[in-house]
Amino acid sequence: MGARLRSLVRLAQVIGRVGGFGRVVRRGLTGGERPAPEPVDLGELAEHRWTAKSAELAETQLSTVARRLPALISQAIKLAWRASRLDTAATLGLNLAAGVFMAFGLLAITGVLTALFAAGPTPERVRAALPSLLFVGAATALRAGLQALAGWAQARVRPKVDRIVEIRMYELTTSVDLAALDDSDFLDDLKRAEGRGMMAAPMMVQHTVDVLTGLVGLVAAAGTLGVLHPLLLPLLLLTAVPEGWASVRAARMRYLTMVALINVERRKWVLSDLMADRRHAAEIRSFTMRGFLLKQFERLAAYQRDVELDLARRQALARVYGDILQGVATAGVYVALGLMLWAGAVPLAVAGTAVLAIRSGQSSLVNLVYATNRCYEEGLYFGDYLEFIAAAEQRIPVATAGGTAPRAMPGGFERIVVENVTFTYPGADTRSLAGVSLELCRGEVVALVGENGSGKTTLAKILAGLYHPDGGDVRWDEVSLRDVDPDALRAHIAVIAQEYTHWPMTARQNITMGKLATGEDGATERAMRRAAADSGADEVITELARGYDTFLDRRFAGGAELSGGQWQRLAVARGFYRDAPLLICDEPSAALDARAEHALFERIRAHADGRTVLLITHRMASVQHADRIYVLDHGRVIEEGDHDRLVAAGGLYAELFGLQASAYGRYRQAPVEDAPSA
């Protein structure tokens, strides 16, 4: 009886050294439940499609996670393998080896405790324990070294995964059919994929490695217990259940809170963009919006704070309950160990090793549960990315050519024929083009005229290869544009767009647009400067501090900002720089004053010189000298001819021209009529 009592005392001492029952009383319970904060009025942001994954996450049960986890792990490992085979193999192999040394170290502790608990003088027991102790130290050091190397290899994988998902995303966003970017559903999918979806990829890989690491640690602890005594293995699972329950419950609370706050986060993001972006600064000050915007932001921030504080309280309660249950389960385990020791089922050294193995297994299981939840969560969002990638790949325009390779793009043409072309924007109820037919001959200046919404810009984008018609055909001589590579077509077209980008690049890059501006003989540099001179952009550039090398964005050191008219001259220079047989000018003078507008059209006519120019403008005086004018109305060509013929016909063109002419006439007469008599 005395020997058994001494064994129980020593077991209690071992338990005390590795943690004891302290976790049972570490935290106290706080007050009872209190109602959640009153929700703010979210208006039109009350619900949106991109909350779908959050809602799915909130409804997920542990069984669902367990069922889907193998596929997610496989997906993550494949992604990491693509990023770096060597680093992925090193991460997995080194973590596995670390688990093996963990098991060896735990088993070696049995030898240490057996020697220390044996009878005899203390120096002799210490000497007897020394070999096993050295083995434990070596195993621990090797495990730490292997884990450090595994962490380094894992850290090397992350930037490589980032690069893969980012490059693939922007390869597709810059090559999908332009109509896809007019599709609201496609844009919603893009927003989710570009935001949380891309960020989830490296996180999913990281949490997958954490899952495998936790699993290896759990298997090592379980294997050690199984070797020591078969009955010890269920004791590990008994202590793991409360911790797992608390982790899953706290995670579920977090997911539900995320669902509740996602629209508040969106509204805050919109308001922060308004208050911090330079584009809105002048109007915020002009209309004294500062106080209003701050009040709106503070209201949302206060609501979010209250919700998150309530979440923290409820999560703390869940963890306290888990700790209490964990303490009860741990006490039960130690009682069971004591009874096994009392009955002589296990030696004291084995019982002490079992305590350490159980504690190690508990830690690994907690990490495993957490990593599993995070892996599943990130896997859902990475699924958004993969779904978008698959959808975008289906929206890349390709030449049909009857299923064969694309036909070669002709270097020029004698005429371009548009035949019965129809087009409808995604989600629209009516056609933007309803059977348009026209032709452009080489060297002509052809104008498209019509009121807003008549289809002029849509038709120009189809001719530029940016949209593909739903029906009908566009041909360069006898070559259908359906049968040629879209990029090859666009290389033969220059566009001066109505909506152009203020590229945050140098003035030189704003003109050349990725085409090298220097060559061995300086020919491309001369072409760039000639385009700037022909468009009048050289007058703008000579006033810049560093000329063509000036960075055109004031947000950066040494950067400059241009006026609307100055930017438009650079946009015209881009079109002139590209030596293409077809020049499309879509409202090229929108930001120019009258003198600059007149000079621009003179430059366009001079630049044409054998090229075909398609001109779209509301300034009727600018189209008088066009070789041919097409008048569009509600997506149809209703008139065709030169200026004199269309004026004589008395149709829509004559009406529009007359309205502008009469307005200029009244402006010229007003000073005379109002002048005081002598």
Image (spheres, grey):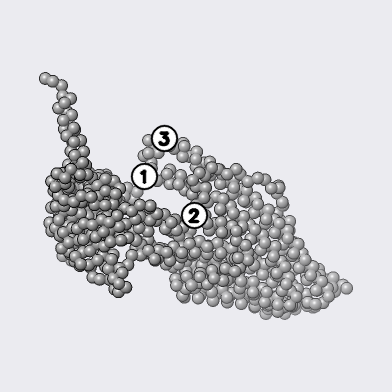
Instruction: Identify the residue shown where x is 66% and y is 73%.
Output: 221
Q: Is residue 573 left or right of residue 75?
A: left
Instruction: Determine which residue is flagged by label 2.
Output: 49
In the rendering, at what x and y percent does residue 23 appear? 71, 59
In the rendering, at what x and y percent does residue 530 appear? 16, 55
Above or below residue 453? Residue 168 is: below
Q: Residues within 10 Å of mark 3 (few under 14, many from 20)?
A: few
Q: Is 497 in front, or is 430?
A: 430
CA distance for labels 1 and 2 = 28 Å
Q: Is residue 387 visible?
A: yes
Q: Which mark is residue 214?
A: none
Q: Quadrant of the N terminus?
A: bottom right
Q: Residues within 10 Å of mark 1 (few under 14, many from 20)?
A: few
Residue contact between numbered discs 2 and 3, judged by CB atoms under 8 Å: no
In the rendering, at what x and y percent does residue 599 appear? 16, 46
Callout 1: helix, strand or loop?
Answer: helix
Dot 1 amino acid type: Arg
Q: Residues within 10 Å of mark 2 (few under 14, many from 20)?
A: few
Between marks 2 and 3 in the image, the one whose residue lies nearer the viewer: 2
Q: Quadrant of the C terminus?
A: top left
Dot 2 amino acid type: Arg
Instruction: Identify the residue shown where x is 56% and y is 62%.
Output: 374
Q: Earlier in the sequence, mark 2 or mark 3?
A: 2
Instruction: Determine which residue is flagged by label 3.
Output: 288
Q: Earlier in the sequence, mark 1 or mark 2?
A: 2
CA distance for labels 3 and 1 = 15 Å
